[in-house]
Amino acid sequence: RKEVEQDPGPFNVPEGATVAFNCTYSNSASQSFFWYRQDCRKEPKLLMSVYSSGNEDGRFTAQLNRASQYISLLIRDSKLSDSATYLCVANTNAGKSTFGDGTTLTVKP
Amino acid sequence: EAQVTQNPRYLITVTGKKLTVTCSQNMNHEYMSWYRQDPGLGLRQIYYSMNVEVTDKGDVPEGYKVSRKEKRNFPLILESPSPNQTSLYFCAGGQAWDSPLHFGNGTRLTVT
């Protein structure tokens, strides 16, 4: 079993839809979490940090549930420009970072 | 502007010919890390460095070496490349292990 598991996708949604991605992590030593966005095999770029208290940035909301060991990303009012692969990552304080395999989102007109 | 620079962007080489992929950051960040990305497998950590002279193995370190003699540079060394090391490689840097990462543009390596 992978240390970080993501929804396999792909997600194909119409513009304006709300879409949610989940990641579960198995390493209980994981302490910091992020969502990244990656376009067409380019470098990943930070989308959001993830906190237990929740984190909102415009149309994006990220949440961490430490008890259940999962993180989530909610995208509201999807835009065509949101089409990308979304990667979650869990980091331990020893420096180890483990990414999920990514979930591909395609937003259609 | 925060920047992580990798070179080269593209590299085709033959089995067994030693190569180095350079990575440099201009952010005075303590943490740096190398990843490889293969279709369907996501980003896998090869090696990471919490600070100068401190390096540790990630999930897939076999066949790779790194060094961190100075804060800004973190080269990835393949002493004897093999075809299974054909991949897309990313270097990344962050202020600390729990900080967001800035990624380089990637190095697409083909070993024949």
Image (cartoon, coloured by chain):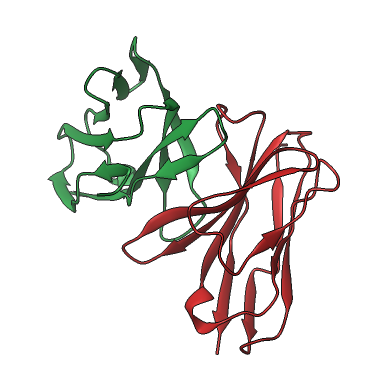
Chain colours: A green, B red
Query: Which image quadrant is residue A82 in?
Result: top left
Residue A11 x/y as whole percent: 17, 49
Kindly give the residue lying farthest to the right in the view shown. Answer: B70
Residue A77 x/y as whole percent: 21, 30
Query: Which image quadrant is residue A81 in?
Result: top left
Taking the image as shown, residue A25 lies to the left or right of residue A92, namely left
Residue B86 seen by the camera: no
Number of numbered discs: 0
Q: Is residue A107 above or below residue B82?
A: above
Q: Nearer the viewer, residue B104 or A12?
A: B104
Residue B29 x/y as whole percent: 73, 33
Residue B28 x/y as whole percent: 79, 33
Query: Which image quadrant is residue A30 in?
Result: top left
At a point 15% along the width and 50% down the height, the residue shown is A12
Taking the image as shown, residue A77 lies to the left or right of residue A38, namely left
At a point 30% along the width and 20% down the height, the residue shown is A63
Residue A72 seen by the camera: yes
Taking the image as shown, residue B44 lies to the left or right of residue B16, namely left
Q: Is residue B97 above or below residue B33?
A: above
Q: Is residue A27 above or below residue B38?
A: above
Q: Is residue B2 above or below residue A59?
A: below
At a point 54% along the width and 50% down the height, the residue shown is B58
Kindly give the residue lying farthest to the top in the view shown. Answer: A53
